[in-house]
Amino acid sequence: MSENASYTLLASADWFPERFDAASANFSFIKADFATIAGQTFLDHRWDRAALEKRSASASSLLSILPQQKPKLNFIWHTGFCCSTLLAQALNDSANNLSLCEPQILVDAADAKRGGLFVRRPAFSDIPKLIFHLLAPKRSPALAVTVKPAPAANVLLRDAATQTAGAMLFLYSDCRSFLISTAKLGEEGRKYVRRMFIALLGDGHMPAQWPPRKLLSLSDLELAALVWHMQIAEFVRSWRLVQARARSLDCDAFLANPLETLTRLDEFLSLNMGSEKLAELVAGPLFRQNAKDPNVSLDSGLRREQNEAIARQLGPDLDRIVSQSYEICPSTPRGAPLPNPLITIDKKYI
């Protein structure tokens, strides 16, 4: 591919980075406008992009023209099951911000990092930096980009800390709520936490040292608790690298006061959406429906009722597993897991 063609893919707002294939070291792109990208609940395999024009380029051709300056990207790092999709959708605004919800390409890069690609082939060590540039704002100086990586991509947090500029929000649920949400999803929830557990084992967390017999003896909810602690551990060990430009947020604080949360987040992320627009948003349909399925009605009250019903079904095992998980993972803070909250909430975590 010519340098001009590679530069077009790197610098143009028309081309969105779809995938990174570690085996071939190639990138694929799709042609998509703001409305198409902003309209996707998730920018991963669930996005039907068969009808969109595609192009590809080698990693080498793109790395050869990689700018040296750090791209300005905002991030919402999250644990999952913490209203991150709702929050990201609330910030989508054609004049001020484009939210990128769980781009598959970041998971591809995380998998490549776990697989040792960047160590085995040092020429590709700047792949994460390249991807951050590909996702960075290009449409207008006034339009920010806020990336909400999938939890499986949280291992890139330290790369983003050194290779990007912009604000970072660390959004989390508490352990008990994480288990309830897992149980609420039934078989799909159990599959999700097992996939996450396997992925996170490659990130250097303590359970990776356990013998297979011990791992196989864990129930689905016990695994879910460990997944939550491993994600918090990633947040805690990365916090010192970004603390000057980071805030934390308990999702319960967001649900208790969405307008104040969004108002503070608007200022923190420098989006300039304004209080009037945010007030209309909170009063509108977005906060009365399931963020992942707008055809399903759901608000904070109904969510709370559903969670309480699941907690009753789980019985005493729920609190036992939460308490046990803190004993297994003693480095997890017993209170709020991270400092510098965007908005505070008075609650117990265990």
Image (cartoon, rainbow, N blue to C red):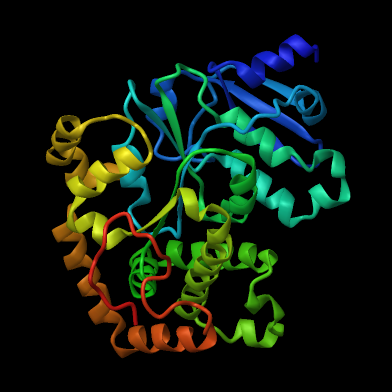
Residue 260 position within the rendered picture, expressed as x and y whole percent measured from the top left: 19, 48
Q: Residue at x 14, y 37 (%)?
A: 279
- Dividing the image into 4 quarters, which one contains the N terminus? top right
Tell whether 295 sits left or right of 172: left
From the top left corner, tell me how far across and down residue 170 is, in percent: 43, 55
Left/right of residue 140 with respect to residue 133 in the rendered view: left
**Measuring 32% from the left and 45% from the top, which residue is drawn there?**
87
With respect to residue 103, does 260 lie above or below? below
33 or 293, which lies in front? Answer: 33
Vertical comparison of 190 with 88: above or below: below
Residue in view at x 33 percent, y 71 percent = 180
Q: Is residue 110 left or right of residue 322?
A: right
- Residue placed most toward the observer, 20 or 241: 241
Q: Image quadrant of residue 9?
A: top right
Q: Is residue 177 visible?
A: yes
* Residue 216 placement, left or right of 275: right
The C terminus: image quadrant: bottom left
Q: Nearer the viewer, residue 110 or 234?
A: 234
Please tell me whether residue 87 is drawn above or below residue 307 in the rendered image. Answer: above
Picture coordinates of residue 34, whole percent (x, y): 42, 21
Taking depth in this image into account, of 22 and 47 the one nearest to the observer is 22
Quarter residue 38 falls in: top left
Residue 122: x, y in percent? 86, 44
